[in-house]
Amino acid sequence: MTANRRTFLKQIGTLTVGSGLGSWSWAEQTTAALPRSHPEAEGVSSAGILALLDAIAHSKHELHSFMMLRHGRVVAEGWWAPYGAPFKHAMYSMSKSFTSTAIGFAIAEGRLGVEDSVASLFPQDLPEPASENLAALKVKHLLTMSVGNEHEPTGTIIKEENWVKTFLEQPITHPPGTVFMYNSSATYMLSAIVTKVTGQKVIDYLTPRLFEPLGITGMTWETCPRGINTGGWGLSISTEGLAKFGQLYLQKGKWNGEQILPPKWVREATTFKIQQPDPAKPSRPKEQNDWLQGYCYQFWRCQHGAFRGDGAFGQYTIVLPQQDAVIIMTGESHDMQGELDLVWQHLLPAIKNKTSLPADAAAQTSLEQALKALALTPPKGRPILPAAAQFNGKTFKLDANDLGLTTASFTFKDNTCLFTASTDQGAHPVACGLENWQLGETDFPGTPPRLTPGGAPRTQPTSKIAASATWKDEHTLEMTWRFYETPHHDTVTCAFDGDQITLSFLNSIAALGGKTKDARPVLTGRV
């Protein structure tokens, strides 16, 4: 037990609080891993889970991790190498559900209410004069993405130093509560409210209330320039941490027999609050669209009576109350609905209305082998070519570029390729396996890829990376850099022509958008 946890428990003991959300209490919890079981023992078909893995393997979806719980026990789990169980993973908007949870705790402690005026919480940051719609804006409108902005303001807000003030200055065209529009800066405001009423960042506020009782460790959260957690994105957490979070909500806020989160808040946060507008050109019937089943308090309603938190590129916590199940997926996909379709097609039928199924040793063995063998195979060409010896150890002087890189070199040795680019401040090496992943860290300029820029400078100067290289032809070396604590990767193409070199970059965010290059400059140079 940490010192902060001991201090917190010393202050509150096993305090029971009544706040209009029902009676609930905190007490010391065990921090053990989730219990493990076998699919059939919990009424789930191993063959059905195998069918999902096979469908993923034959799809364009890239998964990094998968975990399935039934009756509170993990019945299947797997990571596509180089991703692994010990690593955290960036959550993007899955962060929003954790911010909502912090609001739930703050309400339970009597620090605020969903009917509280947002303007009243930040009087020093209000524009003059404040509009009627801004004056009418309440905490519940932030929770339900119904602020009333005509355009999503996050892109404007993250360019500034004071995000709260900039948010409050944005025009609110529609009366709050009348129109749904996805709004990540609204979630940032929820984070700012938690900090305002508690004096703590959301991650610090949640630690003794959520993370420590559930035994979740290693999480990090980005901040704005003023040190407030970004709220709507920026949380990184492990797959099992997500699973515990989903299980807590499935259990209506109870953990190890103790009511961690008020059950009334769980119900309020996960039930229908506002309808999303129908798309102008619907691609499927509304009843089959998981983005049109209603929005809650930073959770989405799903088909089949389920609800979920989700983040860009497919970071999922799916809770199925009717089936007593939780499904976790992380990855990088351009078709998030397509991923959910595979869950409904394969996993839902695999969950039986029984406490257990007859043992299926063959299917269970096949599933265990398939889960252990999950991997994202490095691109293949030819691991080594004569060109490797030709350029081994040579340094290329690079032309002036926006990345500030001055030289680049390649060292081939023992089935590895060490690529080193330098600036006037120092070297930035990336160690690649030749057609195999090599784990390491890098501070290469412009990495890792990010969907949402802005915020305070990263406190961790390096990124964890799994890197591989292969020769596409006798003149072209291709490196793949997987930033395995994020959904993303870089493809770096090194084209050699005599004593000249051209380096081009393509991050996976741009590639999913159909682009052939990203915003970074093409680098040129010569020996």
Image (cartoon, rainbow, N blue to C red):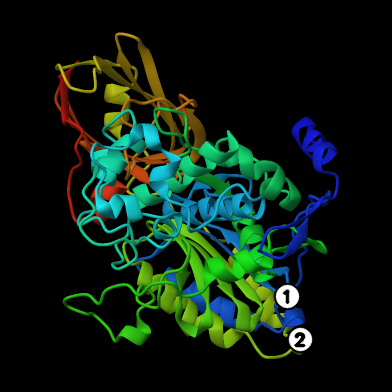
Q: Is residue 248 left or right of residue 118?
A: right
Question: Disc 1, disc 2: CB below 8 Å?
Answer: yes
Residue displayed at 36% across by 54% down? 137
Task: Specify whether 272 is left or right of 470.
Answer: right
Q: Mark 2 points at which residue?
A: 355
Q: Earlier in the sequence, mark 1 or mark 2?
A: 1
| Amino acid at dot 2 | Thr
Quarter that holds the N terminus: top right
The answer to whether residue 63 of the structure is visible from this angle is no
Q: Nearer the viewer, residue 203 or 486?
A: 203
Label disc, if present, on residue 71 of the rendered structure: 1
Give the CA distance from mark 1 to mark 2: 9 Å
Mark 1 surroundings: few (<14), some (14-19) or many (≥20) residues within 10 A = some
**What is the secondary structure assignment of the residue under circle 2?**
loop
Label 2 neighbour load within 10 Å: few <14, some 14-19, many 20+? few
Answer left or right for 186 relative to 77.
left
What residue occupies the far top of the structure in this picture?
424
Query: Which residue occupies the foreground of this view, 467 or 184?
Result: 184
Q: Is residue 286 visible?
A: yes
126 or 215: which is nearer to us?
126
User: x, y percentage for residue 404?
Assistant: 24, 17
Q: Position of residue 355 (x, y in %)?
A: 76, 86
**Quadrant of residue 369 within the rendered picture:** bottom right
Relative to residue 320, is residue 223 drawn left or right? left
Image: 123 above or below 73: above
Residue at 41%, 38% (x, y): give it.
Answer: 122
**Residue 256 pos. (x, y %):** 81, 61
Whole-percent x, y for residue 160 in the image: 28, 31
